[in-house]
Amino acid sequence: MRIFGILAFLLIYINNSYGQCCSAGNPVGGTTNIGILDSGSFRLTTFYRYSKSSGYWEGISKSNFDFVKEADFNFGGLVLAYGLTNKLTVETELGYYFNKSQTYNVSPEYTNKGFGLNNGVISLKQNLISKTEKQPIEWTVGLGIKFPFTKKYQIADNVELPRDVQTSTNTYGIVIQSFLYKGIPTRSMKLFLTNRFESNTPDVKNFRYGNSLINSLFITKQINRTNWTAIIQVRDEYRSKDVNNVIKSNYLGFITTGQVVNFSGGNLIFVSPQINYTIAQKWNVSLLADIPIFRYYNGIQLGNKYSFALYLSRDFGKKKCTK
Amino acid sequence: MKQNLKNNIMKTLKLIFTIALLVIFSVGCNKEVTVPAATPTNTSNSTGTSTITYSSLVASKDTISIGSTTQITATASGNGLSYNWSTNNGDIIGSGSQITYGASGCCGGKNTVTCTVKDANNNQESKSITILVQ
């Protein structure tokens, strides 16, 4: 379990890499702090993310569709975690969009801009397997509730903003996570496999975002025993189609019947190089960027152009963490 | 090791059960919901003396293709009017008495655009129009 101490919070991803349209699978995301903490210890992670989208995709090809010229957002996030026991950690995720904007291809040019709080997430993470001898392996699972701070759509200048620039899903959801660690001491390597599933309930307009499943494989390596750590991540993001005009909800709203939005969801694969620097063995600064290597969009959707994130993290604990 | 794993799984199941209960209380029971009305409506919600005369809500095109737009104009008179726009699906571009409505691929079908006009006395009247996006 202590293996996670320093490394766990370095394993971050940007899980909002879809175009701005339909990207609210989990806007808060941004981190998979799945590693658990020692009893009584505390972890603080802050991060900043920027994402820009432009150009439409149809299936695996670029499209000439040009409804939205470009879209972008600036996002700040805060993740707080506390070790209830040595095997159980509670964690909260909060976030704020400084802007979430999209500019249309109309004359004169016009931009819709939203800003404000994102959904919050409260999760519990339970360590199930922990073995740290010659063949270290650990497995932690988590279950969380995603909740809105308001169910109302945001309004600007007396106009209700479109869904794509809403800063929240405006509804409840559920988050299920898994985190598997395998050390390979003979090769001085560490492998991490993380999985995160999210499902949302319909909002006040009877719109329900599709489910998302994000699987990430991380390989980490300390650079020549310095404070620098290089991390490479391969990530697959799958999203099912959204449902509009929901006419029937079952199982708390997680199973719905309605009009399937064929221009939503898809599958994206990214490679995300990441570099981390440890300051005084307390603070960690990390920078990552996303490089798409495969995209498949259902129908025609706005595609992500580029995104990057900067993270700052620190553990405060009763016990000193060790790698 | 095996016993520990079993105990841990039991603890996790208890947690899942507890959280599921919280979700139930937060979200509520299964519910039937209805599709929003897809036909034009005209509603009034005035309190006190209204100065609003709401003549019409008209679209330049009531059928558009995905990715294209139509202009929608609200014609009303009264004291200190404000125009409040919303839609069940799609994008409202602009503000004031005339806006542009457009829809990307996510928003095909019959969509409703509503304009609520409010006067200085906080009286209000609403009209809706249906735009078919195909």
Image: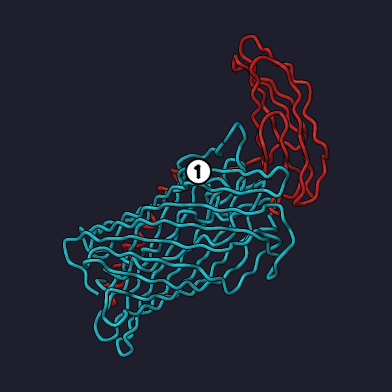
Chain colours: A cyan, B red
Asked which secondary structure carries label 1, the reply is: strand
Toward the viewer: B27 or A68?
A: A68
Q: Residue at left 62%, top 65%?
A: A266
Q: Residue at left 62%, top 44%?
A: A111
Instruction: Indicate left or right for A309 with B58 as reference.
Output: left
Q: Residue at left 70%, top 60%?
A: A300
Rendered location of residue A214, percent (x, y): 50, 67
Q: Going by the picture, which residue comes out furthest to the front?
A: A108
Q: Going by the picture, which residue comes out furthest to the bottom?
A: A186
Instruction: Indicate left or right for A262 with A272 as reference.
Output: right
What chain is tagged by disc 1?
A: A
Rendered location of residue B87, percent (x, y): 67, 38
Q: Amino acid at mark 1?
A: Phe
Give the crowd class for mark 1: few <14, some 14-19, many >=20 residues within 10 Å: many
Residue B51, above or below A212:
above
Residue A56, above or below A223:
above
Rendered location of residue A59, percent (x, y): 69, 68
Rendered location of residue B57, percent (x, y): 77, 28
Residue A117, above or below B80:
below
Residue A99, above or below A277:
above
Q: Residue at left 57%, top 50%?
A: A250
Q: Label 1 belongs to which residue?
A: A115
Quadrant the N terminus of chain B occupies: bottom left
Q: Going by the picture, which residue comes out furthest to the top?
A: B49
Instruction: Indicate left or right for B98 with A158 as reference.
Output: right
